[in-house]
Image (spheres, rainbow, N blue to C red):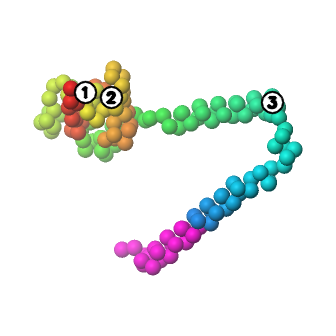
Amino acid sequence: MSQYSITDEENLMNLMLTSLVEEFKYFFLCQSFYPVFVSTKRANMQTSRRSFIISSATLATGLAMGQAVFAQANLELTDPLVKALGYVPDATKADKAKYPTYQAGQMCGNCLLYQGKPGAATGPCPIYSGKLVSAKGWCSSYTKKAK
């Protein structure tokens, strides 16, 4: 049972909503008066070569770091969902006794859910939140692709 009553939750939601509305008001107010805050001297000043190079280097570094952050992760074999669905990176090693639906030739690469490119060694799977699975792998969620 929660330590908060319904009225406490309603008060908290109202407080959060009010705070959000105030932040939007401030944001739009600042955006509409932005030209007033910028001095005309700075607005008409041209960008120097040094500031351009520094800005470009910063942008390139940010983009490189962003790609590393958003790179897809390989599927961890210790993940509880992986164990529950019986995923194996090599379909020939699927437990045929535990998963009688497995048939030779079934693998992630020819599964309807597999989103990797044809011929790729790995590809994302929506069952595992888009993590990379082996094209030669198999799990009990296998669904044959329509030809």
Residue at 30% from the left image edge and 32% from the top image edge: 114
Mark 2 element type: strand
Mark 3 element type: helix
Q: Is residue 12 magenta?
A: yes
Disc 3 designates what residue? Answer: 50
Residue at 36% from the left image edge and 25% from the top image edge: 117
Residue in front for this viewpoint, 13 or 4: 13
| Callouts 3 and 1 close, C-beta under 8 Å | no
Q: Residues within 10 Å of mark 3 (few under 14, many from 20)?
A: few
Q: Does the rendering let one see residue 78?
A: no
Disc 2 designates what residue? Answer: 134
In the rendered structure, which segment of residues is drawn in magenta?
A: 1-19
Amino acid at circle 2 = Ser
Q: Is residue 63 magenta?
A: no
Q: Residues within 10 Å of mark 2 (few under 14, many from 20)?
A: many
Amino acid at circle 3 = Arg
User: Label 2 vs label 3: CA separation?
Assistant: 47 Å
